[in-house]
Image: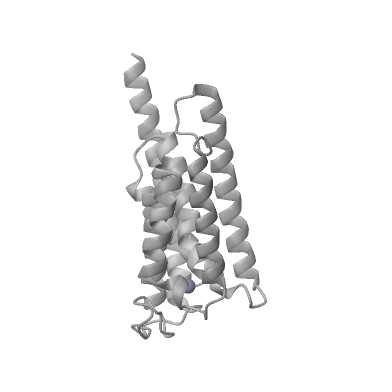
């Protein structure tokens, strides 16, 4: 599937699993955005298409906004988990960068689309920031699932050969339908869960 479709479906799945709180939704947006696109870093040697540029542009904007919100919340309350409070986290972040650099150089739909990459990156993200990990993992799994539906093999069980169901073309009608449904689900879940979080706060207040 195309980048924006991966992003929409991945974020929608992460939001569905998120608790109804501003912080929970924030972590779901951050983890879902990066998790749903990270597999495709193995396309970095290609000339990026408009869809890829737009997809990564949206993902980075969502992640950066969430990161700034979380940093602000931390400095305001000193209660939220600090992303940079523990020097060990910088080591795990370094290892994550090394893992991503290794994945960048692989063939498309190879190592970066595998359960090996999923497990290694999820563990490192868990060690860096626990709240984002589940949503990153959900985003990652939706990416693999959507790519397996296509006609080009995905090496999910790397180093074994790739698998695919050959149901859809990556840029065909199924892609458009999934993009539309994913975007609608993102908007509906955000509004619904934000409303629920407001109601919970109101009940606690009175
Ligand atoms: Zn992919």
Residue at (56% x, 55% y) in the render: 59
Check the image and report above or below for 50 versus 35. Answer: below
Residue at (55% x, 41% y) in the render: 67
Check the image and report above or below for 197 versus 62. Answer: above
* Percent x, y of residue 73: 52, 29
Can residue 65 be seen here? Answer: yes
Q: Quadrant location of residue 80? A: top left
- Which of the two residues, 157 or 135, is positioned nearer the viewer here? 157
- Which of the two residues, 14 or 185, is positioned nearer the viewer here? 14
Indicate left or right for 183 with 50 as reference. Answer: left
* Percent x, y of residue 125: 44, 51
Q: In the orientation shown, which residue stands out farthest toward the right?
A: 47
Please tell me how many numbered marks the rendered image carries: 0
Q: In the orientation shown, which residue stands out farthest toward the top?
A: 206
Can residue 185 be seen here? Answer: no
Colour mapping: one colour
- Which of the two residues, 155 or 168, is positioned nearer the viewer here? 155
Q: Quadrant of the C terminus?
A: top left
* Percent x, y of residue 93: 52, 51
Check the image and report above or below for 21 versus 117. Answer: above
* Percent x, y of residue 183: 47, 57
Check the image and report above or below for 140 versus 25. Answer: below
Q: Quadrant location of residue 139? A: bottom left
């Amino acid at each position: 599937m195309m980048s924006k479709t991966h992003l929409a479906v991945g974020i929608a799945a992460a939001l569905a699993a998120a608790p109804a709180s501003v912080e929970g939704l924030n972590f779901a947006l951050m983890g879902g955005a990066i998790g749903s696109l990270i597999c495709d870093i193995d396309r970095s040697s290609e000339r990026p298409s408009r869809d890829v540029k737009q997809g990564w542009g949206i993902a980075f904007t969502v992640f950066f906004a969430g990161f700034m919100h979380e940093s602000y919340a931390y400095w305001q309350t000193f209660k939220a988990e600090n992303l940079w409070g523990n020097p060990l986290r910088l080591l795990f972040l370094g290892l994550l960068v090394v893992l991503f650099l290794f994945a960048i150089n692989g063939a498309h739909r190879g190592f970066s689309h595998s359960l090996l990459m999923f497990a290694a990156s999820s563990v490192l993200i868990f060690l860096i920031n626990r709240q984002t990990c589940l949503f990153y993992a959900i985003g990652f799994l939706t990416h693999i699932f959507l790519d397996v539906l296509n006609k080009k093999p995905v090496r999910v069980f790397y180093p074994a050969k790739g698998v695919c169901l050959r149901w859809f073309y990556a840029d065909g009608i199924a892609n458009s339908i999934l993009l539309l449904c994913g975007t609608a689900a993102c908007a509906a879940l955000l509004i619904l869960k934000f409303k629920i979080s407001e109601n919970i706060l109101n009940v606690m207040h009175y």
